[in-house]
Image: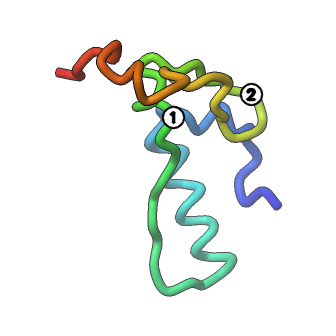
Amino acid sequence: MRVISVKISSLRGNGDLIAKAQIESYKYFKYDIIRIFTDLYQQAEAMGATVYYPEDETAYLQAPAIKDLSEIDRLEQLT
């Protein structure tokens, strides 16, 4: 079900559209609380993971930044 007529990719990085979607969802479902949560893939991508961003689906991990815990020291610290 879509509460606003936009593709998922349109929401990425667009606070106004995210707010509109949350408000319209609240009006339709009348739930008790609104929790805004998009995804954690941006952080994973920043640390070297490969993330796929489909046009009209949620993002998903294509490849992790490391394949084994022994590679942990290869990750660069985020500043």
The residue pinned by badge 2 equals: 54
Which residue is more in the foreground, 13 or 63? 63
Disc marking residue 31: none
Q: Residue furthest front?
A: 70
Image spot of residue 13 (x, y percent): 47, 32
Relative to 77, 34 lies left or right: right
Relative to 18, 54 lies left or right: right
Which residue is more in the foreground, 1 or 58? 58
Which residue is more in the foreground, 76 or 13? 76
Q: What amino acid is found at the position of numbered circle 2 in the picture? A: Pro
Relative to 48, 11 lies left or right: right
The residue pinned by badge 1 equals: 41
The number of numbered discs placed on residues in the rendered structure image is 2
The image shows residue 69, relative to residue 23, as above or below, that is above
Image spot of residue 6 (x, y percent): 73, 41
Q: Earlier in the sequence, mark 2 or mark 1?
A: 1
Image spot of residue 59 (x, y percent): 65, 35
The quarter in which the C terminus is drawn is top left
Residue located at (47% from left, 55% from top) = 37
Which residue is more in the foreground, 16 or 45? 45
- Comparing marks 2 and 1, which lies closer to the viewer? 1
Residue located at (23% from left, 22% from top) = 78
